[in-house]
Image (spheres, rainbow, N blue to C red):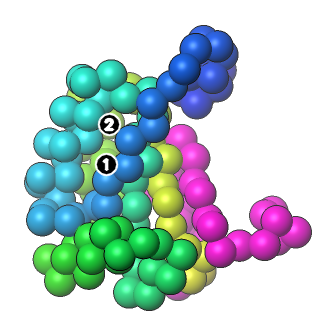
Amino acid sequence: MNRLEQVFAEKKKIFISFITAGDQSLEMTKKLILTIAKAGASIVEIGIPFSDPIAEGKVIQRANIRALFAGTTTDKIFDMLKETRRDTDVPFVFLTYANPIYVYGCEKFFARCKDVGVDGVIIPDTPFEERE
């Protein structure tokens, strides 16, 4: 049973937190993820910053811009999460758009997710019919 299945198997209310990776810095993101996990979050949803986050509200749009301005990249997020995974077993779920995955390379992206311990990916702009 994977980490997400374990959370949902407990049949209790869960708290899913959200943070935009790299907003302020990736060092701060790591600290916040660990703090959120210690505070009892069941799942940590991590937004990969994107230059055109049209499905987001103003607060998350601004967080994306700050993270990108700080130099956040997908590779740097993966590196930070690999370090962070050593200190917590809370499930990590990415929230990202389809374009960054395709630009990164689908196979490479999902292989890195597996390597660093990302448990799921939410892609809000992908039609249901294209989920595979």
Please, what is the three-letter code of the amino acid marked with disc 2? Arg
From the viewer's perspective, is residue 7 above or below residue 54? Answer: above
Residue 129 falls within the magenta-colored stretch:
yes
Q: Which quadrant would residue 63 be assigned to in this image?
A: bottom left
Q: Which quadrant would residue 73 be assigned to in this image?
A: bottom left
Residue denoted by label 2: 85
Residue found farthest to the right? 129
Residue found at x 31% / y 69%: 59
Residue denoted by label 1: 81
Q: Do labels 2 and 1 touch, CB within 8 Å?
A: yes
Q: Is residue 97 visible?
A: yes
Determine whether, in the image, residue 91 is placed left or right of residue 106. Answer: left
Residue found at x 63% / y 67%: 124
Residue stretch rendered in magenta on the structure: 103-132
Q: Position of residue 112 (x, y in %)?
A: 47, 57
From the viewer's perspective, is residue 108 above or below residue 104? Answer: above
